[in-house]
Image (spheres, helix red, strand yellow):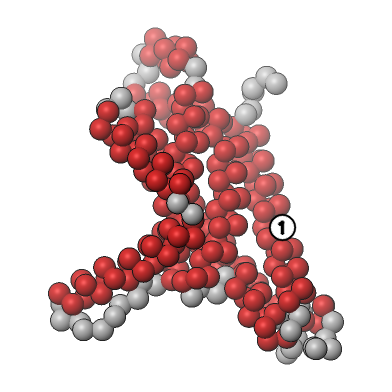
Amino acid sequence: MNSLGFFELMGFGPLGWGPALLKAACMTLAIAGTGYIIGATLGTLLAWAKISGRRSLRIMAETYTTVLRGIPDLLVIYLFYFGGSLALTKIAKLFGHDGFVDLPGFAAGSIAIGIVSAAQHTEVFRGAYRAVSAGEIEAAQAVGMGRLLMFRRILLPLVARHALPGMGNVWQITLKESALVSVTGVVELVRQAQIAAGSTREPFYFFFAAAILFLVITSLSGLVLGRAERYFNRGVRR
């Protein structure tokens, strides 16, 4: 059993794992942030498809959200990672490359998480749009606002106001789902804790430290999202 204490193991000295854990925490943030942006972008398009009034687009979007919400997230990551690697290998063969081509773990994990979170973003954005009062849109049209001006001055702020709480929840889920990306070989926070625990035989210390770091990240994220909500709710009577 390692004789070093908790603070020595988590420190920045020659035997400390602090730098490795912080680097892994940054990787976790990078994966979650990239996946979240992909999910929000794709979710916006899917939400538009659901409310566009076109039956074909609505069916496509509903099929997407039903499938992605029904498959375990870890399975989606596996399918995307191995399927993407297989596709890259076949494409490489067309250009004369005979070896196997791996899809980079960071790219595979981030895109897979983004694809999963897109299904959640879709429902958040669709619900936020439906929550906007038709009277406010009619009032904007009555004063002669064009579509672009109405979107920027009326629709976007109102949708953002209704969507932010849900977006915050999706961010917290995405952040925790980043731990699944270790199956692609990426050393994020949980994987680094596993490596350190195996090396020092102090699993409790390192998993506890990983939990604390996740809690710090989620708490700071909550503060930022709270400020954003207050900004978009300015002038709203409660």
Residue 56 lies in quadrant: top left
Q: Is residue 112 left or right of residue 157?
A: left
65 shown above or below 18: above
Q: Whole-percent x and y of residue 14? A: 73, 90
Counting every numbered tag in the picture gives 1
To which quarter of the image does residue 1 belong? bottom right
Q: Is residue 138 visible?
A: yes
Q: Is residue 91 left or right of residue 128?
A: left
Across and down, in percent, residue 137 comes to 43, 17
Quarter holding the C terminus?
Answer: top right
Left or right of 95, for residue 119: right
Q: Between 15 and 73, which is closer to the camera in this rendering?
A: 73
Residue at the (64%, 23%) spot, across then down: 235
Q: Which kind of residue does numbered mark 1 sit on?
A: Leu
Is residue 37 visible to the viewer in this orientation of the structure? no
Category of crowding for the residue at label 1, using alpha-carbon neighbours closer than 10 angstroms: few (below 14), some (14–19), many (at least 20) = few
- Residue at the spot 67% in from the left edge and 53% down from the top edge: 218
The residue where tag 1 is placed is 215
Q: Secondary structure at mark 1?
A: helix
**Left/right of residue 190 with respect to residue 50 in the rendered view:** right
Q: Residue at left 62%, top 69%?
A: 189
Residue 153 position in % (x across, y down): 46, 26
Nearer-the-camera pick, 185 or 135: 185
Q: Give the vertical position of 155 relative to 141 (above or below).
A: below
- Percent x, y of residue 40: 45, 45
As rendered, which of 146 and 224 lies closer to the eye? Answer: 224
Q: What residue is rendered at 47% in x and 36% in y?
A: 123
